[in-house]
Structures are given as C-alpha cells and as structure tokens.
Image (cartoon, rainbow, N blue to C red):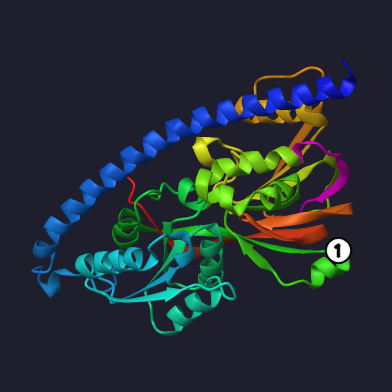
Amino acid sequence: MSTSFWLALVLVLALLLILLVLTGVVLARVNATRRQVAELRTLADQHTEQLDHAVHLVEDDTDPDDESGHGLSKVAIIFNPSKHDEPNAVAERMRATVESIEGAQVTIIETTEDDPGLGQATKAMDDGAELVIAAGGDGTVRCVAAALAGSDVRMGIVPTGTGNLLARNLDIPLEDPEAAVLAALSGQDRRVDVGWLKFGIGREAAEAADEEIFLVMSGYGADAQMIGNTDPTLKKRMGWLAYVVGGAKSIVGRSHNVVVTLPGGSRYVVKARTVLIGNVGKLPGGLVLMPGATIDNGKLEVLVAGWRGAAGFGQIVTQIVNPRLVSKPKLSTMERYLTTSVRVATAKPQPVQLDGDTEDEATHLIARVDAGALRLRVPTRG
C-alpha cells in the first residue's frame, strides 16, 4: 500500500483517539457541572428565605463603608439574542430573577451584529448601572469587559455560548441562566486580570494598532485556523465538540520559525504551528491547557507548540493530558513562558484569534497583562 494511505490511516486513528479522550473528559465535567447547578439552586432558595429577615435589620447596625451589605439599585443585562430560540422569554426570566431577589431597576440591552456589547456596556455605565451582566458567549463577555475594565463597576456573566471558557474557569453555572444570574447577584467580588493584544503585518503596524482585550486566551496559527474552520451550524448542534471537527483541517501543516521576546530582552527562536497567550488555562471537559494561567496572578502564560503531522499532534495532546509521558521519536515541541508581557514575531502571516473571535492575519503580536483591572462577580467560595 502507498505511503499516503498509511499517513491517512494514522491521521484518522489519531483523531479518533483525541475524540475519545475529550468526550470522556467532557462527560465527567458535565456531571460535575450539574451537581454545581443543583447546589446553587439550593443556595438561592436559602437566600430567598433570608431576604425578608434581612430587610428588618436596623440601619445603625450597617457599616456605611461596607459595600457588601448594600443592595443594588440599577442592574443592566447586555443580552445576545442570537444564542436563544426564544430570546424574549429568556431575557424576561432573567429580569424577573433580578427584580425578585434584588429589587433593582433592570435594563436589558440587546447586542447587534454591528455592536456586540461594547457600546451597550458603555451606555449602561453612563446610566449608572452598578452591575453589568454579560449574557452571551465569550465574544459578548469580551466586549462588555472592554468597557468595564479599569472601572469600579461590577461585571457578571450568564454564559450562553459554545465554549464559555471564562465561565468554566470561574465555576459559573453553564446550563441555567437563572442560576448564573443568582451567582452574579449574591456572589463575591473578585479583581481579575485582563489581557491586551496588538497585532499587525510587521512590527511597526503592530505597535501602531489599537489594543484589543482578551480574558481567556489569544494567539495565532493553528488554533485560529481551527476556529475559522468550525462550521457555525455544527457549533449549535454539537457545542464545543464542533471545534474538534474543525480542528482536523488544522492538524496537518508546516511549523514556522517564531521569535518570542520577553521583558528584559530575552529572546527565543522556536519552531511552531501555534502560539497561545493565556489568561486562564482550563478547556472544556476540565482539560488544563495552561497550568500557569491563573486569572488573578498578574501573569500571562505563553504556549508555543510545533508538530509534524498527525502523530506529532498526538504527542502534543498526550503531553498536555499527562506531562510525565515522553514520546519517541520526538515529533513535536512545546515551550511555555510565564510573563507580564510578550512580543511574538514570525515571517509568514498567520490568522489571529481573541477568546474564540477570529481576526485578520498578522506576523507580529504584542501582548500585556492588566492586573486586577476587572471587578468580576463570581460564585461565593465554600
């Protein structure tokens, strides 16, 4: 049989192995998430029972400087209607939850194709909202965060997208919008980092570009190709597993020389198919891609990975799942850097992505972390 036949066979077997591993992990994670949602509902019931008692507290017993004891008077929900079959019904349930629990004035502002969240969140801030809830996918969350970063306005998340990677990393309920609203109302404030990325064709173009925010991860190369190759209809049917199907087209390809420059001038030349810059590191199914990427450590983790063919990609997956395993022959490379900023350059333009949103191609990336820039509401830790 021909060499091409065996290469095709290896590719198919590698993809099947990857799908089996990821499917097993995600099923375990779904069960865990369902348990978390049930626990949150119980907490919500307890919160409601205690509400009547709380309103009878004497004003003199409240510390005027303690914001945690104050209710919210204005809440805005930045709502992506494209994520729901019955968007009006979902939005009204969220409104009712806020009004019944918090007694606040609620404004619902829908996103549009022309403005996926930035303008709406800016308006909500200007109108005096004390809590702005991003109800959508990672793209909606990213746009709302771009408006709120650097301010003292609280941000909540109701994840309704495909990946919902930020919500997964923060243990925000994924399958119940009302439970996520409750987490935003009764959770704790957490100052979290955000990443900022500039990119362009050539160093000068990258330096002159506007910064764009990311909360999960950005980068260029095969990961952006995978996102671009994923069919939107398949995403609605399969969820995040659609990315695995789209990724099949991105496995085969050539690595390129990439120059990574860190603060202080340290430079590294690495063969790479993809470069990822992470603010958080957990993927769907509980798989940890970047163990050093913690959302409040003031650092970004840079992962530079290269491989040869399906077998080399299989080595990358194996190393991520179990770093102790060493594969031979060595058909892949993977380097990690933990840093406050990074510059990445390559000669061949590569597609760029920020939190799953694909952008134009670039040869140069300039990224930095903005420590503690966002005041995020997360579920209260037990």
Left or right: residue 107 versus residue 20 is: left
Residue 53: horizontal and vertical position, in percent? 9, 62
State which quadrant residue 307 falls in: top right
User: In the rendered structure, does residue 255 fall within the stretch colored magenta?
Assistant: yes
For numbered disc 1, what is the local secondary structure? loop
Query: What residue lies at 87% left-to-right and 69% top-to-bottom?
Result: 204
Determine if residue 342 is in view. Answer: no
Q: Which residue is mark 1?
A: 201
**For the magenta stretch, what is the residue range?**
250-263
Going by the image, does 162 lie left or right of 299? left
Q: Which quadrant: the N terminus?
A: top right
- Whole-percent x, y for residue 120 in the image: 49, 77
Is residue 315 shown left or right of residue 42? right
Q: Height in image: 165 above or below 28?
A: below
Q: Quadrant of residue 66?
A: bottom left
Q: Is residue 95 left or right of residue 150?
A: left
Residue 142, horizontal then vertical, whole percent: 56, 63
Q: Mark 1 is on which residue type?
A: Ile
